[in-house]
Image: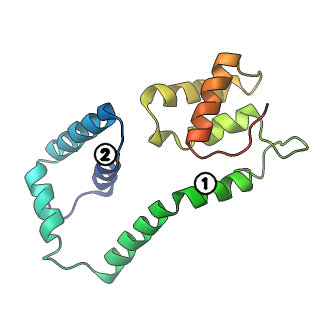
Amino acid sequence: MSELPAAVRSKLAKALRLLSSDRDGEVLSAAHTVARVLRAVGSDIHTLSDLIEHGNGGQLSEAEMKKLYDAGYADGRADGVRAAEAKLHHDQDGFRDIDGIPSWHEVAIWCQRRSERLRETEAGFLDDMAGRTVYSEPTPKQEKWLRSIYLRLGGGRLPS
């Protein structure tokens, strides 16, 4: 198990990050996901633990250490990155009103691009909103939910 395919490593990393959630359901789901992904490649949690503990004979290459450092640094700066994205209005190609506020369609697309951080129902809602907002405004209830997701993901100013 010293080498896992990139897709498997990516799934495991996402699930392991969810273990830090403050929502018990997400934590439980993440734990089951880790076990399921490991079983799918013929492994288990003990093998993963050994890999973490001993790794590459206890040695990490310079490239691996830099990658780990960069990932940790990026996670620590997430709020700053979201603030910078909000300041730049996320997408310079789309329509903005005179105040530089994105349209509801742009908000839905921006959120949809970050849907891996959301629950399945929210991701489905965003898929629906991305299509609906091309031609119409969201209903008040849809607007409230879309606004909530957008702000939670670190979005900036919104249409009123």
User: What residue lies at 35% left-to-right and 48% top-to-bottom?
Assistant: 14
Q: In front: mark 1 or mark 2?
A: 1
How many residues crowd mark 1 within 10 Å: few (<14), some (14–19), many (20+)?
some
User: What residue lies at 34% left-to-right and 53% top-to-bottom?
Assistant: 10
Residue 95 x, y percent position in the rendering: 83, 42
On the question of residue 98 being in view, the answer is yes
State the count of labels: 2
How many residues crowd mark 2 within 10 Å: few (<14), some (14–19), many (20+)?
many
Alpha carbon separation for disc pair 1 and 2: 22 Å
* Left or right: 15, with 127 as reference point: left
| Amino acid at the residue labelled 2 | Ala
Residue 72 x, y percent position in the rendering: 40, 66
Q: Quadrant of the C terminus?
A: top right
Against 3, residue 149 (above or below) is: above
Numbered badge on residue 15? 2
Residue furthest right as drawn: 98
Residue furthest front as drawn: 22
* Left or right: 40, with 157 as reference point: left
Q: Earlier in the sequence, mark 1 or mark 2?
A: 2
Q: Nearer the viewer, residue 27 or 97?
A: 27
User: What residue lies at 57% left-to-right and 30% top-to-bottom?
Assistant: 126
Residue 112 x, y percent position in the rendering: 57, 38
User: What residue lies at 17% left-to-right and 74% top-to-bottom?
Assistant: 56
Mark 2: secondary structure: helix
On the question of residue 43 being in view, the answer is no
Q: Nearer the viewer, residue 158 or 43?
A: 158
| Amino acid at the residue labelled 1 | Arg
In the picture of the structure, the residue carrying the numbered disc 1 is: 82
